[in-house]
Amino acid sequence: MESLDMLANNIANSETGGYKTDREFYSLYTSAEAAGQGSEDPATLPVIERAFTDYSQGTMKTTSNPLDLGIQGKGFFAVDSPSGVAYTRNGSFQLTAAGKLVNGDGYAVRSASGSPITLDPSLPVEVAADGTISQSGQTGGKVAVLDFANQSDLVKQGNTLFRTTDPKTTPIATSAAVQQGRLESSNVGSSESVMRLVSVMRQFDMLQKASHIGQTMNSKAISEVARIAT
């Protein structure tokens, strides 16, 4: 069930910009009783030990929007969400009527100094590879691009946002390049995910049948043992 839910969510977000696919790490479970002395052939079962996020680079797609920003390399944009600072690879940004740079959820994009970025909506926007924003030759701020020494410290907040599990975790600078007019696609391998989904569904169906057979055998054994011979 965990695998089915995870794979279905990956497939549903295969076209979501900046989405990072989830994967599972399996191990084998052996009960304490089966692993004890006197057990010649203990039964083991596969179990999902932990799920993890694959942060590999997605394909960069060119758009006609100068406010679309993609990160080539490791790093995240930072936004001010209602629950605190969140991080994202989805650089589909826009300007509000007041000129504030926000993401698709309306959260303010943070500058390198940690403050919101405010621009003139009437002027063209140019963004350099280091995230510096300029309008008519004047610098209008610098988009923060941050990374983490251990990306496993991040957990998903929705589909394209991440947050730190420990408030004391401090982001670090990164040498990743910001590409204007480009967006990073989801890194979900659609064909791979569909094949895995079909495989897991078949395994799930086999386990259901095995469970049903076991219940039938138990019911039959109980009814026959309880029957009084005549």
Image: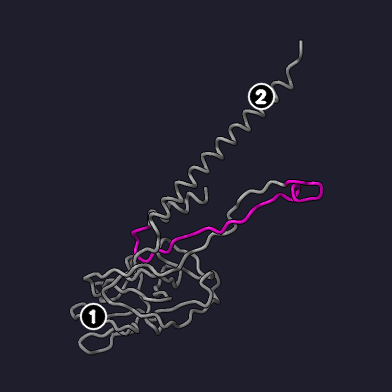
Residue 162 locus on image (x, y percent): 45, 67
* Horizontal side, residue 15 vs residue 200: left or right: left
The quarter of the rendered structure image containing the C terminus is top right
Q: Residue at x 45, y 46 (%)?
A: 198
Q: On screen, 1 above or below 78?
A: above
Residue at the outermost top position: 230
Residue at horizontal 50 percent and vertical 69 percent from the top = 154
Query: Which residue is under mark 2?
Result: 220
**Residue 17 belongs to magenta span:** yes
Q: What's the image's color scheme?
A: one colour
Q: Which is nearer the eye, 164 or 33? A: 33
Residue 181 magenta: no
Residue 218, position in %: x, y?
Answer: 67, 29
Position of residue 202 measured from the top left corner of the image (x, y, whole percent): 49, 42
The amino acid pointed to by label 2 is Lys
Badge 2 crowding class, 10 Å Cα cut-off, few under 14, some 14 to 19, many 20 or more, is few
Residue 207's place in the image compared with 72, above or below, is above
Residue furthest to the left: 122
In the drawing, what numbered circle is on residue 43? Answer: none
Image-quadrant location for residue 56: bottom left
N-term-proximal mark, 2 vs 1: 1
* Dot 1 amino acid type: Val
Instruction: Note whether 141 is above or below 78 in the view shown.
Output: below
Image: magenta residue range: 14-41
- Residue that numbered label 1 is attached to: 125
At mark 2, the secondary structure is: helix
Q: Quadrant of residue 116?
A: bottom left
For marks 2 and 1, give the one nearer the viewer. 2
Rendering coords of residue 204 (x, y %): 52, 42
Closer to the camera in the image, 110 or 193: 193
Q: Secondary structure at mark 1?
A: loop
